[in-house]
Image (cartoon, rainbow, N blue to C red):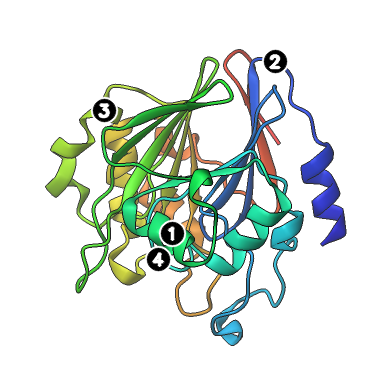
Amino acid sequence: MSDFKETLRSISVPKGSVRVFWLEQSHFVVVTPQGARIHIDPFLSREVKPENHIYPMPLLAPADAVATFVLLTHDHRDHTDPHTLLPMAKGNPSCRFYGPREAIERCRGAGMEERRLLAVAEGDSFSVDGVEVSAVHAESTGDKDDTTHLGFIVHIDDIVIYNVGDSRHSPELYADRLGPVRDLRPDIMIVPINEGYNNPGPVGARRLVEMVDPRLVIPCHFGCFKHNTIDPQLFLDALDEPLRRRVRILDRGASLEVSRTRGASS
């Protein structure tokens, strides 16, 4: 735990690049040349059914997760986890939290300060420390609730990252809602590949990638829960060779540095 904590605190990124860490499930940390640490869907607790986790312990304690700001895609516990977010907030007094209404209500109910919370909706854009963020559509994966799902487009200088968030299978049914990203050709696309709970699975994830046509693809939403994981090789097998070459599968705690001029390196 302590080794990863130090890595995350000390790493620097050259101008014109970003570094993307994958911790587990859908938790990513994006490190910018200016030193910002942007967390997306942080999940660092074992409070709910710890026996279901593949790894008994998270990579670091929530209070040790240095954070500039946090993006939450939706109010499911592996994406908006108060046992992660409240210690993160206490450990990072200037960190702010952005997400759909239900996720922000969850943070508020956990006791987080109102001044640090901002509810965002599809179509909203905002800027934090020179990073431009836009909230875009993600199709709700729930059968019995209408919890708002979002994806996020993150602009860091000339590099564009598109995090799909959790989004329902059969993306062709909501393709018209993905207009803001279809002509963007992001440098990095982060996509869930699991099949459980109405997520895209390998075929739906492939269709999303084909629609968006990114430079690089990082799959996620696996390797966390015993009952809801998938071998990422199945996602690779679903892709045609040209798209397969764009995929970067990260190990837990690993990272990828991406530059507009130099491509990607581990």
Find residue 68 and report its horizontal and vertical position in percent: 64, 38
Q: Amino acid at mark 2?
A: Lys
Q: Secondary structure at mark 1?
A: helix
Give the spatial CA distance, label 4 vs label 3. Answer: 24 Å
Q: Position of residue 43 (x, y in %)?
A: 58, 62
In what element is the residue under mark 2? loop
Earlier along the polypeptide chain: callout 1 or callout 2?
2
- Of residues 91 and 166, which is closer to you in this image? 91
Within 10 Å of the Cα at label 2, are there few (<14), some (14-19), or many (20+) other Cα atoms?
A: few
Left or right, residue 200 beside residue 60: left
Q: Quadrant of residue 129?
A: top right
Left or right: 153 with respect to 183? Answer: right
On the question of residue 240 being in view, the answer is no
Marks 2/4 in contact by CB < 8 Å: the verdict is no
Residues tagged 4 and 1 counted as in contact (Cβ below 8 A): no
How many residues crowd mark 3 within 10 Å: few (<14), some (14–19), many (20+)?
A: some
Residue bearing mark 1: 234
Depth check, front residue: 214 or 122: 122
| Residue that numbered label 3 is attached to | 180
Mark with earlier residue (3, 1): 3
Kind of residue indicated by mark 1: Leu
Q: Residue flagged by tag 4: what amino acid is it? A: His
Q: Residue at x 21, y 30 (%)?
A: 179
Q: Could you tell whether 241 is left or right of 212 in the image?
A: right
**Which residue is found at the position 72% from the left and 28% from the top?**
35
- Label of residue 15 in the image: 2
Q: Residues within 10 Å of mark 1 (few under 14, many from 20)?
A: some
Numbered circle sitting on residue 76: 4
- Give the alpha-carbon distance from disc 2 to disc 4, as whole Å: 35 Å
First of labels 4, 1 by sequence position: 4
Mark 4 vs mark 1, foreground winner is 4
Lower sequence index among marks 3 and 2:
2
